[in-house]
Image: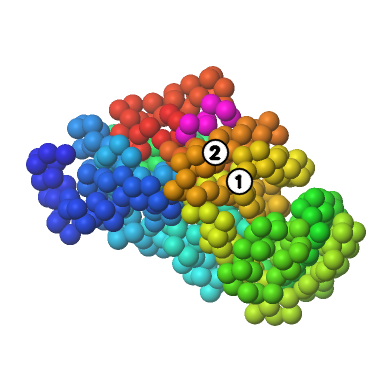
Amino acid sequence: MNNSDIEFFTNLLGEQNAYFDEAHKIAYCYDATRRRFKPDAVLFPRDESDVSEILKYCNAHNLPIIPRGAGSGFTGGSLAHEGGIILGFEKHMNKILEIDLQNLVAVVQPGVINKDLQNAVAKMGLFYPPDPASEAYSTLGGNVAENSGGMRAAKYGITKDYVMALRAVLPSGEIIRAGKRTIKDVAGYNIAGILIASEGSLAVITEITLKLIAMPKFKKTAMGIFPSVKNAMDAVYKTMAGGVTPVAMEFLDNLCIKAVEQKFHKGLPTSAGAILICDVDGNIEDSLEADLRVIKDSFMANGASEFRVAKDEKESADIWFARRNCSQSITCYGSLKLNEDITVPRSNLPALLDKIAEISAKYGLVTPCFGHTGDGNVHTNVMADKSNVEEVKKAHLAIEEIFAATVELGGTLSGEHGIGISKAPYMKMAFNEAEMELFRAIKKAFDPNNILNPNKMGL
């Protein structure tokens, strides 16, 4: 970046919104991967017009732009791994613009925190269901860019199921609208669908129109304790086949249970092979009791030794504590955690978990697993000692084999975290050359000069 570039951005945004100092470069050099790549600048656009002018200039001068939400991603999607300019939205473009009670939509800027929107609409009796684990700090722009999921996905779906329309700026500086506030819209290509999960590589999203639904009046939480992961998985299928769709159906294996108990002493059954935690909700309290009876019957018929139902919000929070604090607890197994979010059809979960155990044993590694059995999404954590070069090498080989097994079982490399730079080397496992060429053609159509988040996703 030269002096004329610095002068342009400073004149456009003001010194308080255009930073070229070391402190800002360091502050924006990392994400949840803990990898570090210093950008050349950090810019905070005040509005869509600023975004347009920034992109127009960068496109003309071949300057890479990396859109960034909260930096909470697990795959390096918002890292300036080849230099470039970080475009941050948390300072100015962070407003809920409208909550439309008649059409049940919210219009937001990309820097709005997920949980802030949930809280705002809840005050009006409405509900925005997508709940990534990072909901307290991740932005809705980042959620859309990664197509974030969450624990309520089993019943309510993921981010893409709630995006009705987007405004975005192309690398040329042109502003486009994709989608409508209407329930039905089949005019033209689904451009909004292409931008969702594109990881900021096609256009910069500046406004999001999200579908809302009515807030369910009642919710109940329950937990089942099982002798093995297979028993727990069988209980999941039996529950779904019984006509009940839980809001969430989460599992922890024995390694996770032991880790949480070691760190927090919550009285978890450390001899259990697995636990399942589920929520049900609805507008008729008696229907929840009926759902819980079906779930209990399914759990007990598949070997559960115990079935607990939370009596109140406090007990519900206590039950969910183990799941929400699992990721930080399993660091007791190693200083390096290769955290992957592989996903397979629900019916193939037992086979996948068996394969993970087999691969872990082959390399002599510990691999705690937890995640969303309701939608087939497993958080697989290959643990290693980062000071042991050989062990780290084995961990990466294990991950490669786990990805191969996932694809063989009809699954995908990522259910939530995206591809970024971490999973880019494995894209050819999941997609053939014709498919990869199609991805490249789409990228080129949107971004012919390759300035937007370049060289991510294996493209």
Are the two marked residues, 2 and 1, in contact with CB atoms closer than 8 angstroms? yes
Q: What quarter of the picture does the N terminus occupy?
A: top left
Secondary structure type for disc 2: helix
Point out the image quarter for the C terminus: top left
Crowding around mark 2 (Cα neighbors within 10 Å: few <14, some 14 to 19, many 20+) is some
Quadrant of the rendered image containing residue 455: top left
Q: x%, y% of residue 66?
A: 33, 43
Q: Residue at x 70, y 34 (%)?
A: 409
Return the residue nearer the eye: 150 or 74. Answer: 74
Residue 174 visible here = no
Which x, y percent locates residue 256?
64, 59
Q: Secondary structure at mark 1?
A: loop
In magenta stretch: residue 428? yes
Highlighted range, magenta? 424-430
Determine if the magenta segment contains residue 147. no
144 or 341: nearer the viewer: 341
Question: Which residue: 38% across, 26% down?
Answer: 444
- Place of residue 243 in the rendered image (x, y in percent of width and height, measured from the top left): 83, 55
Residue located beneath label 2 in the image: 394
Q: Position of residue 395 (x, y in %)?
A: 54, 41
Residue picked out by circle 1:
365
Q: 367 left or right of 101?
A: right
Q: Main secondary structure of the magenta part?
A: helix
